[in-house]
Image (cartoon, helix red, strand yellow):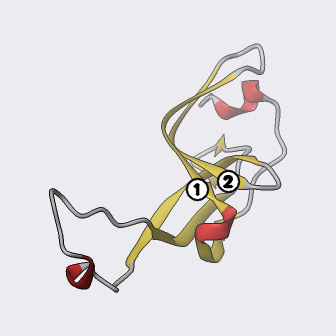
Amino acid sequence: MVNNGLAVPYPLVCVWWVDSVQVRGWCEIAELPDSEMRCVSTGYLVKETDDAVWLAGHLAFHEDDRHDVQGTMKIPKCAITERRLIEPAQEVPAADCFPR
């Protein structure tokens, strides 16, 4: 994403996924809910493996090409029902991520 001269080297994505559900305290088996908890998360796709994606809500760029993340979430791919690209990554050195 390029914004006012700032470049972000990670794609911005929106991921729909199904989460596990927990019942608090004792519960009769017949009372266990059948419903799913459907979730949506938006963030920068900072890491992807065969089994999961990592989204980050916040990025920090060092001038020596190191990147830090905050507000991360790992989502198992088996839980993902849909994934959409909002903005593609920009292939740029970290120094170009700073305003001039």
Kind of residue at disc 1: Ile
Residue 45 falls left or right of residue 94: left
**Position above or below: 91 against 63:** below
The N terminus: image quadrant: bottom right
Residue 94 falls left or right of residue 41: right
Q: Percent from the top left, x then y, of residue 40? A: 45, 70
- Which mark identifies residue 53? 2
Q: Nearer the viewer, residue 82 or 66?
A: 82
Q: Percent from the top left, x then y, of residue 42? A: 50, 61
Q: Residues within 10 Å of mark 2 (few under 14, many from 20)?
A: some
Kind of residue at disc 2: Val
Label 1: which residue?
75
Secondary structure of the residue carrying tag 1 is strand
Q: Name which residue lies at 73% across and 20% down.
A: 66
Q: Earlier in the sequence, mark 1 or mark 2?
A: 2
Q: Percent from the top left, x then y, of residue 55? A: 58, 49
Q: Name which residue lies at 82% across and 31% down.
A: 93
